[in-house]
Image (cartoon, rainbow, N blue to C red):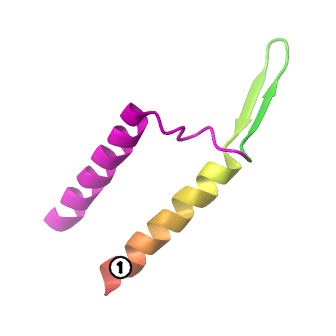
């Protein structure tokens, strides 16, 4: 359990550093943004796919 908490913490720190450096996490090409008068819809499709692939690779490395 301790190892999992350390890895989760390191991932959060890495994401924070990327945001601090200006990497547009959450605003990737392929994400859908619809703005109307009193309505905003944001569908982070590309961001979700990228996060899924990264988590899958981390999981595969973890099992080895």
Residue 17 lies, with reference to residue 48, above or below; the image says above
Give the quarter of the figure containing the C terminus. Answer: bottom left
Which of the 4 quarters of the picture holds residue 49?
Answer: bottom right
Residue 58 lies, with reference to residue 33, above or below; the image says below
Which of the 4 quarters of the picture holds residue 42?
Answer: top right
Is the magenta region chiefly helix, strand or loop? helix
Whether residue 48 appears in magenta in the rendering, the answer is no
| Residue 25 appears left or right of 7 | right
| Circle 1: element type | helix
> Which residue carries the number 1 mark?
61
Q: Where are the magenta residues, as a range?
A: 1-29
Whether residue 24 appears in magenta in the rendering, the answer is yes
Q: In the orientation shown, which residue stands out farthest toward the right?
A: 36
**Which residue appears at 61% of the width and 53% of the height?**
48
- Position in image of residue 45 (x %, y %): 69, 50
**Which residue appears at 53% of the width and 57% of the height?**
51
**Which residue appears at 80% of the width and 13% of the height?**
38
- Position in image of residue 11 (x %, y %): 32, 53
**Which residue appears at 42% of the width and 36% of the height?**
19
Q: Badge 1 local density, few (<14 within 10 Å), some, or many (20+)?
A: few
Q: In the orientation shown, which residue stands out farthest toward the bottom?
A: 64
């Amino acid at each position: 359990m301790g190892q999992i908490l350390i890895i989760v913490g390191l991932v959060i720190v890495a994401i924070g550093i990327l945001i601090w450096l200006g990497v547009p996490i959450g605003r990737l090409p392929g994400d859908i943004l619809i703005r109307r008068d009193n309505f905003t819809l944001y569908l982070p499709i590309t961001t979700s796919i990228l996060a899924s692939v990264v988590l899958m690779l981390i999981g595969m490395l973890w099992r080895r």
